[in-house]
Amino acid sequence: MASLADPLDLPSGVRLPNRIAKAALSEALGDADNSPDERLVTLYRRWAQGGYGLLITGNIMVDRAHLGEPGNVAITDDRALPQLTAWVKAAHDGGAVIFAQLNHPGRQSNLLALGHTPVAPSAVPLAMPGATTPRALTSAEIEEIIERFATAAAVCEEAGFDGVELHAAHGYLITQFLSPLTNLRDDEWGGDPSRRMRFLIEVVRRVRGRVSPGFAVAVKLNSADFQRGGFTEADSRAVVAALAAEAVDLIEVSGGNYESPAMGGSEASSTREREAYFLDYARSVRREADGIPIAVTGGFRSRTAMEDALAAGDCDLVGIARPTVTATDAAASILEGRTATLTTHEIQAGMRRVLGRLTDLKALDGFLNLSWNTDQLHRLARGLEPDLRRGPLVTALAMVRRNGRVSFAQKRGLR
């Protein structure tokens, strides 16, 4: 029976010093060239001293022309190698292992970037106010994006990262290929479950072929997208079985997307009380995973629940995200017995009766909580402490200001 303090050896040989991971949180702290700067070094230095066995970065995009939000770091070549190396050093100096989370937003590119046309497997718009109908990718463009993931992974290894995590969850591009709701293709990239998962498998293979055997390759995968007719747990189990045949080091289980949030402050109180939202699913795919370590992120708050999940063999690694924003030393606090239960700060939109007639309050609350946490990360990156008094109105204004930068045309050289 594993405990939180036990190390975890991944198939590639990377050793995590304990079983608590700082899961990905989108930092939006890239500079004007979408490269990391001293703010990310400051932020990760604080987390690296917080006792986590693994730090997973927030969204790093593989194409500067397609960002999930302004401020995303993007890796398309080695132009920012010194800054990336400094980022890694901040984690390693604190004794943490660090993975870079690689992503492409697809149709979930910044919703407030006017004049930008997102791309996706098929021309299916996001069911959110103001969303632009994406352009369906050509086969040649799909191959190009696969190569972008591989190039970014190779640069990450050169910079000293211990591994990468491919983001195949939360409605981003890889998830769009996996879901029958967003992948309406009938070519080699869609039409049945096997072809819909081909994009992910090809990304894994291309990445593994460009990095050394001792470099870890992880995948963040939805248990389901919780939409009628969408990506189901049965579909997800089939993907896990396919990943087990590849050189994958870790599968992190999550769920939901922008249209149907499953975590992030908008979930029901009964869901929060169960703590680990996706633990039942993780337990059910142990056989399909065939020995690949499983991480579960979403809802863990108490040391008891974390220890019980590990002891039962339901997962091998516990991921925590939002608690690390207000307590950068959350892992050490749990491991040293200083804290029995972690806390999070959650906000809700005001004027709920009026707004409820105009939009989905659950989704709005989810966006607000994501923005609130981003605001706190920016404070931490400036060497400040979190501001727990920050309310929904100020948070909403900051969200619009941060994401509402207008871009009427792609800039030369962005790709």
Image: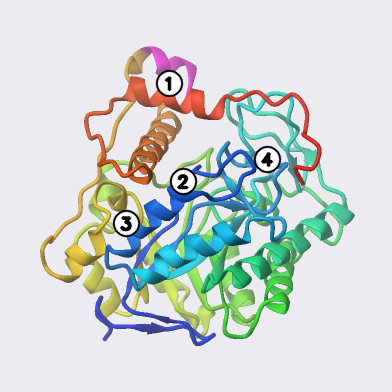
Q: Residue drawn 27% across and 68% down?
A: 51
- Can you see residue 193? no
Res. 56 image quadrant? bottom left
Res. 408 image quadrant? top right
Residue 76's x, y, as percent? 71, 55
Q: Residue 355: within the magenta?
A: yes
Circle 3 sits in a helix, a strand or a loop, which is it? helix
- Can you see residue 36? yes
Circle 2 sits in a helix, a strand or a loop, which is it? loop
Q: Is residue 104 above or below residue 151?
A: above
Question: Alpha-carbon neighbours of circle 2 within 10 Å: few (<14), some, or many (≥20)?
Answer: many
Instruction: Work out how far the residue at label 2 is from the one at label 4, CA to CA, in angstroms.
Output: 20 Å
Q: On the image, numbered disc 2 is attached to which residue?
A: 27
Q: Earlier in the sequence, mark 4 or mark 1?
A: 4
Q: On the image, numbered disc 4 is attached to which residue?
A: 107
Q: Which is in the foreground here, disc 4 or disc 3?
A: 3
Q: Could you tell me if the residues under marks 2 and 1 are in contact, i.e. CB atoms within 8 Å?
A: no
Q: On the image, numbered disc 1 is attached to which residue?
A: 397
Q: Earlier in the sequence, mark 3 or mark 1?
A: 3
Instruction: Work out how far the residue at label 2 is from the one at label 1, CA to CA, in angstroms.
Output: 18 Å
Q: Could you tell me if the residues under marks 3 and 1 are in contact, i.e. CB atoms within 8 Å?
A: no
- Amino acid residing under circle 3: Arg
Q: Residue drawn 64% across and 46% down?
A: 105
Q: Which is in the foreground here, disc 3 or disc 1?
A: 3
Residue 46's disc number: 3
Prevalent SS, magenta region: helix
Point out the stretch of residues depicted in magenta.
Answer: 354-359
